[in-house]
């Protein structure tokens, strides 16, 4: 991170994102960026040993990846092969230059998440949108 923020003190990037996804405007904007017509409040967040995050409800399982090492990709592939009651979606956050061949693979930028939140009435200068941008070394405003 370019900026040192107390909110993220001692946290890795994935732990910082996990903390931000506990804030409804961030969680709602991320889910709305990926899926249309779903209720973001029905999704539960889980951290998988700091390798990836998942957001799941009764229908969808979103794998949120920030890093693209072979271990993570192999683990997600194995998990997807065992899933029969969810629609799995792999969300690559700020990784639009890599393709892994998942059936549903979405490139998502921090700017798109912020744009969705702003369209839903959140101020561009909302503290948590600023924190999200800073976490991914984007311009705070």
Image: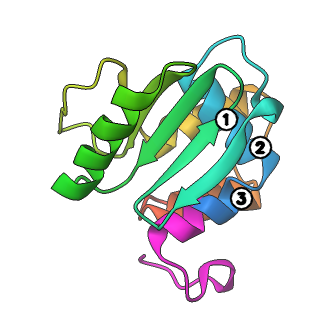
From the image, state whether disc 3 or disc 1 is nearer to you. Answer: 1
Residue at the spot 46% in from the left edge and 67% down from the top edge: 50
Is residue 80 placed above or below 25 in the rendered structure? Answer: above
- Which quadrant does the N terminus fall into? bottom left
Which residue bears the numbered disc 2? 25
Which residue bears the numbered disc 3? 128
Is residue 74 placed above or below 80 in the rendered structure? Answer: below
Q: Which residues are magenta?
A: 1-17
Residue at mark 1 to residue at mark 2: CA–CA distance: 6 Å
Does the image show residue 79?
yes
Residue lying at the far top in this picture: please name it: 37
- Which quadrant does the C terminus fall into? bottom right
Q: Is residue 6 magenta?
A: yes
Element under disc 2: helix
Pointers 3 and 1 in contact (C-beta within 8 Å)? no
Q: Nearer the viewer, residue 13 or 56?
A: 56
Pointers 3 and 2 in contact (C-beta within 8 Å)? yes
Splitting the image into 4 quarters, where does residue 69 fall? Answer: bottom left
Pointers 1 and 2 in contact (C-beta within 8 Å)? yes
Q: Nearer the viewer, residue 121 or 25?
A: 25
Is residue 82 placed above or below 48 in the rendered structure? Answer: above
Element under disc 1: helix
User: Which dot marks residue 29?
Assistant: 1
Sooner in the amino-acid sequence: mark 3 or mark 1: 1
Residue at the spot 73% in from the left edge and 17% down from the top edge: 38
Q: Residues within 10 Å of mark 2 (few under 14, many from 20)?
A: many
Residue at mark 3 to residue at mark 2: CA–CA distance: 8 Å
């Amino acid at each position: 991170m370019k900026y040192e923020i107390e909110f993220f003190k001692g946290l890795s990037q994935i732990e910082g994102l996990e903390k931000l996804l506990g804030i409804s405007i961030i969680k709602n904007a991320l889910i709305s960026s990926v899926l249309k017509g779903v209720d973001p409040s029905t999704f539960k967040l889980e951290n998988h040993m700091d390798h990836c995050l998942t957001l799941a409800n009764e229908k969808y399982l979103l794998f949120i990846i920030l890093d693209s090492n072979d271990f993570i990709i192999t683990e997600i592939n194995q998990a997807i092969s065992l899933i029969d009651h969810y629609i799995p979606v792999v969300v690559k956050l700020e990784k639009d230059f890599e393709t892994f061949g998942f059936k549903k693979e979405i490139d998502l930028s921090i700017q798109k998440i912020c744009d969705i939140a702003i369209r839903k009435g959140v101020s561009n200068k909302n503290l948590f949108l600023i924190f999200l941008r800073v976490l991914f070394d984007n311009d705070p405003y």
